[in-house]
Each structure stands twice: as structure tokens, then as C-alpha cells.
Amino acid sequence: MAGEVGEPADVLRLESRPVPTPGAGQALIRVKATPVHASDLHVLRGRYGFSPEFPAVGGHMECVGRIEALGPGTEGLKAGQRVVVAAVPAVPGPQAASTWQEFLVADTRRLLPVPDRLSDSSACQLAVNPLTALLLVRRELDVQPGEWLLQTAAGSTVGRLVIQLAGHLGIRTINIVRRRAAVEEIKALGGEEVICTEDEDLLQRVAETAGPAGVRKAIDCVAGPLGAQVFQALAPGGAVVVYGALSTHRQTDPAALTIPLHARSVIYETKTLRGFWLNRWFGTASPEDVLHMLSQVRSLVVDEVLSIPEGRPFPLERFAEAIALAETPARDAKPLFAFEDGRDEEDR
């Protein structure tokens, strides 16, 4: 629980609360695992796209758990069922339940059943990054087999998922990384071309790779000068979808939160730049469409088309360690809060 806006390590504290009661169309979930995303920490800092009412429980994205009870007249699911909770707050729309707690109540339209063979670690990370990758590639840009897709931060979680998805769909990727040491790793993952901004010219390499036809579709989660270079590297009529701003995560000056675009590219080459935010997609998509896309993601993960790296579990009592790990740039695994299920195996 955070009593006020601030640095997570300073404002979070453990607190016991009553177990909530589900209403009509809701389910009580006993949480098994929930990730510590960077966005969760930025919400607490007051630097994300929405702000909860404080005091607030942390965790605003996703978790996996079992249905403990259903509200009156609620149908379609049953007690004991293992589900992913897509707790991403819809913007615009009501806030969803926070996930850094042992029990929560969720709208059943936010629940996706998952098979027991999918680990808690994979299941609790299914509703944010894999869904973002799928929406960017298929919905936002509709990248077709054989087309080039240019992306920044190829070594990020979404970047790696995009590479895997592109390989499955026959899409060719040009992947941008900051460090030379990351190049071989991205190639081994399936990235067709890799550009290292540490010692290579991005515009020249894109032109050499894509040839006269150029690249018309790109995704960017860095923003700043690198995002501007990606925009400049596109062929006339190209589009960039920006879904993050890694270059600004420690920036507090609003004037620095920019992408300095070249006006000639906008005017004479009619290129476009637009944003994507999963919260706003949840706020505009129908519940049926949300479950449809989540079901697609589930299939891709269960069929091992998309691989989600195993996280590192922490009990909630060690939240300070989990947050410190989440803030480590070169961490080996994403921290997760893990809870005991509270059920004997024979009862499942």
C-alpha cells in the first residue's frame, strides 16, 4: 500500500485489509503471482498516464490466480479455475483492481482461463507485453509477410516478443540496440538485421538494408533523438508508432519529453507518427475484442510461438528487494510477487 505519491521504496508499506466480496459479474481471485513492471513504479511516482486515488495498493497491470468465489448470478466461470486477470486500467474508464495483494475482485470480462501447464511466471506476464507486441504488429501497423519492420530497444521485453512474432508471421525485422554486446544475442533470437547505435549510422544502415523501397513501418519505445532518427529513416509515406519513452524515464522536465521531428519529413514526405498506449486501447476496445486478442496471445504463448522469460519470485514481505531488482538496468529476470495458493493439490 502506498500512502501518497513518491518513490516506491519510500511510500510503500505492508498492510492487512479485509478480503473483498465479489458483486454481480465479478469474481474473487486468490492471486498466485503478479509482476513488478516499470509502469507500476511510475504510477506510484505520479509519472504515468493515469493516477489512482491514494492511499493505493500497488500493481496496476496483470496477475494470475484462482477463482475463490463468484458474485451473485455470475456465470461462465467456476470456482477453482485458474485465470489471468487483465487488470490494466482502461482510459477512459473505471480503474481495475490493483494486483499487489493476495485477494482481489475483478470483472469476469477481465478474466482469461489458462491451462495449468503454463507456469505462473509466464501466465502472470501474459496480458501486457505479449498483447502489446501483437497489437503493434497486427492491429496498429498491419505488417505483412515479407515487409520490413524497424524497431528500437530490440532487447527489451516487447522488442524480443516482436522478433519472435515476426519470425512466426514471416515479417523481416531491423532491430536497433545500444550496445555492441547485444547484437549477436538479438540475431540468435531471430532478428534478421541489427543496428548498433554505439558505433553505426542508423540512417545509412537502414538505407543499405532495405534498399530503394525503404522501410515504411516502425515501432519505437525510446522517443527523444533516437525516435526522431527512426522517423527520418522511414521511406516517404511511412509511419512510426511510439509506445514508450525509455529515454525520458528519469526525466522530470516536461520540455525534455519530446521527439524532435524533421518538418520536411512530415510535410514533403507525408510521414506520420502516432502513439499507442495499452490502457487507452482497453478503454476503447469492446470486452469481446479484448478477450479475443487475449485468447490469441494465450494461444501463441501456450504453443511456444512467444516465449516469456521466467521471472524471479519474491514474497510480498520482501517488496523492497523486488523493487530494487526492477530498477536494475541489466537484471536477469523480472521480479514477481508470489503467493501460496492455499489449496491442497487433491482439491484442485
Image (cartoon, rainbow, N blue to C red):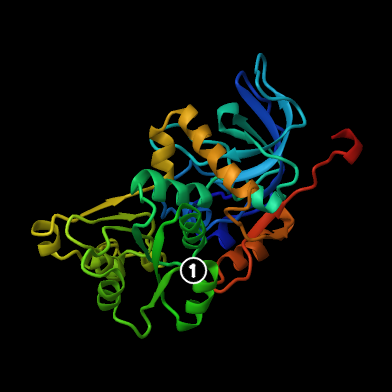
Q: Quadrant of the C terminus?
A: top right
Name the residue located 63 percent from the left edge and 70 percent from the top edge: 332
Closer to us: 334 or 112? 112
Give the structural element (helix, strand or loop) at label 1.
loop
Residue 313 lies, in percent from the top left, at: 71, 59
Closer to us: 205 or 146? 146
Residue farthest toward the top in the current orientation of the protein: 73
Residue 11 lies, in percent from the top left, at: 57, 56
Question: Within 10 angstroms of label 1, few (less than 14), some, or many (20 or more) residues?
Answer: many
Name the residue located 56 percent from the left edge and 37 percent from the top edge: 295
Residue 156 lies, in percent from the top left, at: 49, 65
In the depicted structure, whether residue 306 falls above or below residue 348:
below
Q: Is residue 325 left or right of residue 224?
A: right
Amino acid type indicated by mark 1: Gly
Q: Which residue is mark 1?
A: 155
Name the residue located 51 percent from the left edge and 41 percent from the top edge: 88
Q: Is residue 199 left or right of residue 181?
A: left
Q: Is residue 70 left or right of residue 162?
A: right
Closer to us: 153 or 36? 153
Residue farthest toward the bottom in the current orientation of the protein: 199
Name the residue located 41 percent from the left edge and 64 percent from the top edge: 249
Q: Is residue 19 left or right of residue 254?
A: right
